[in-house]
Amino acid sequence: MAGSLASRLILRRSQPPPPPSIQSFFRRGISQPAAERTKEATLPAPPTEFPPFDYTPPPYSGPSGEEIIAKRKEHLSPSLFHFYKTPLNVVEGRRQYLFDDTGRRYIDAFGGIATVCCGHCHPDVVAAIVEQTKRLQHSTVLYLNSAISDFAEALASKLPGNLKVAFFTNSGTEANELAMMIARLYTGCHDIISVRNSYHGNAAGTMGATAQSIWKFNVVQSGVHHAVNPDPYRGLFGSDGEKYARDVEEIINFGTSGRVAAFISEAIQGVGGIVELAPGYLASAYDKVRKAGGLCIADEVQSGFARTGSNFWGFEGHGVVPDIVTMAKGIGNGIPLGAVVTTPEIAKVLTQRSYFNTFGGNPVCTAAGLAVLRVIEKEKLQQNAFVVGSHLKERLNALKDKYELIGDVRGQGMMLGVELVTDPKLKTPAKDETLYVMDKLKELGVLVGKGGYYGNVFRITPPLCFTKEDADFLVDAMDYTLSRM
C-alpha cells in the first residue's frame, strides 16, 4: 500500500529518546541542602488509614511466594511474567480488595480488567455458581437447560437494535475469533481491518488482528489490515476523528478489492493504554466499512458491562450500533465465559455449516453471567462507575496539573489511564519511572496495572464497587510517591 496514509505515517514515526537514568528522579536525602529538606517536610504524607472493611481473612498456611515462584519456573511456561520486583502472593479476595499471605489488604485498582466486575467473590455470584454446580455442572446444548437461554435473553435486553442472538464461548479470544469467522462467512470476503495499538486475543487470527507487536507475536494473517490509531494524545491528527478514518477508506480502496468482511475495534483501547478513540472516528469508520459491504465488530471485552459509567457498552459513547458485539472478562466476574451477540440475519450464516463449543454456554458459567447482570442492576454499579470514576478522574487531573511527569489522564468511568512522560512536550515515555511508581504504590497498599505501546501508562480499572474512599487513597498514594521524585 505504498504511498497510502498508513505507510506515510510509519515513515514519519520516530523512536523516542531513551529516558534519563531513574536515579536522576529521586533525591538522596542526607546530603540535601536545608532548604530542600524544609520543602520536603511540607510534601504530602503517605496515606495510612485504609477505607474501613468488615472482613479479616483467616491465617494462611499455604506455600510461600518463593515456593510458588520455584514451581512456576520448573513447571509453567517461561513466557509467563509477573508484576513487581517482589511478586505478590494473593491468597484471598473480597469485593475491591485483595489479601496477601500475611493477611495484608490491598486496594485492587486493576482487577476489573482482569475479569472482576462486581467485586472479588461477590456472594450473589458465588451462590449462583455453587447452586448450579450442585444441580448440573455441564451438559451439551443438544439437551435443554434453562441457564443458557435465560442468560441469553437477559444479555439481549442490554443491547440496542436487533442485537439479540448470542453464541457463548470460554474467552474473549474465542469470541473475537468467532466474530471474524462469522463476518467472513456472511460477506463472502476475507479482508479484516483492525486498528493499530489494539488488542483482540491470543489465537492466531486474533493475534493477526492485534496490531501491537510489542505485546504479541507478529503472527501474519492474510487479509488483515491495520489502520492508523486514532489516538488524541499521540496521534498525528490530534482529536480529528474524520482524518484518521480516511485511512480506513484508503485501505479499502487501495489495499483490498474494494470490499471488506469486517472492521473490528475496541471503544477504548485497554492493553494499548486506555486510549480513547478520537471523537467522530468510530461513526465515520463504520460508515466507510458498511459502504464497502463489511460488518462492524465492537470488541467490548474490556469496556463493556457498565465499566464506562455513562453507558453500559463502550460503543454507545460513540453513537454507533455495531453488527456484532464481542464480550468476556467482566461478563462472568472471573468465570471463563465469553460471548458473541449479533442479529438473527447474520447469525443464520452458521447454519450453512455448524458451530459448536463444548464448554461455551455451560450451565455453571451462564448462571454466573446472569447473576452478574442482576448484581449490576441491584447495586447500581453503572451509576457508581460514573460517580466514583468521575471523582477519580478529576483528582488524577489535579495531579497532572501538579506533576510534569504525568503527560495525560484519560478514559471514562472505571476505565482510566495515566501516562507518564519524562518530557511533556516531546512526550518521551517514562517506562522506568512507571515501574518504580508501581512498586511504591504496592508498598503503600495499592495495585494498578500498566500498559500502552511503551509500557508507560497506568491502567486503573477497579471492580465497579470501588468507592470514593478507595479512589482518594489511590490518588493520595500516587501524590505521595510522585512528590518524592
Image (tube, rainbow, N blue to C red):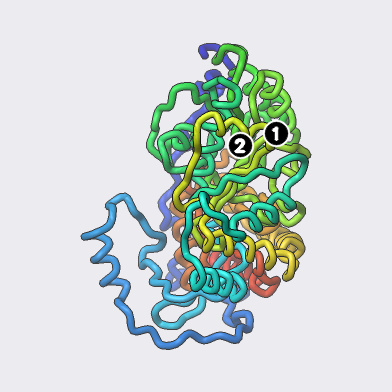
Where is residue 272 drawn, in percent x and y?
54, 44
Disc 1 crowd rating (10 Å Cα; few below 14, some 14-19, many 20+) is many
Disc 2 crowd rating (10 Å Cα; few below 14, some 14-19, many 20+) is many
Where is residue 155 drawn, in percent x and y?
68, 53
**Nearer to the camera, 309 or 48:** 309
Dot 1: element: helix
Q: Is 199 placed above or below 70 here?
A: above
Which residue matches tag 1?
A: 282
Image point (62%, 45%), residue name:
166
Where is residue 451 drawn, in percent x and y?
50, 49
Image point (21%, 60%), residue name:
74
Residue 418 appears in view: yes
Q: Which residue is most to the front?
A: 143
- The label number, if any, that marks residue 238 in the structure image: none
Where is residue 391 drawn, in percent x and y?
74, 63
Q: What residue type is labelled 1?
A: Leu
Q: How far apart are marks 2 and 1 (CA)?
A: 8 Å
Q: Residue 249: which quarter of the image?
A: top right
Image point (43%, 67%), residue name:
28
Dot 2: element: strand
Which residue matches tag 2?
A: 265
Image point (60%, 42%), residue name:
299
Whether pointer 2 and pointer 1 mark residues with C-beta atoms closer than 8 Å, the reply is: yes
**Nearer to the camera, 409 or 134:** 134
Q: Which amino acid does label 2 sit on?
A: Ser
**Nearer to the camera, 381 or 163:** 163
Q: Is 431 placed above or below 260 here?
A: below
Residue 107 appears in view: no
Is 240 positioned to the left or the right of 419 in the image? right
**Disc with the residue nearer the chain's start (2 vs 1):** 2
Q: Is 381 placed above or below 293 here?
A: below
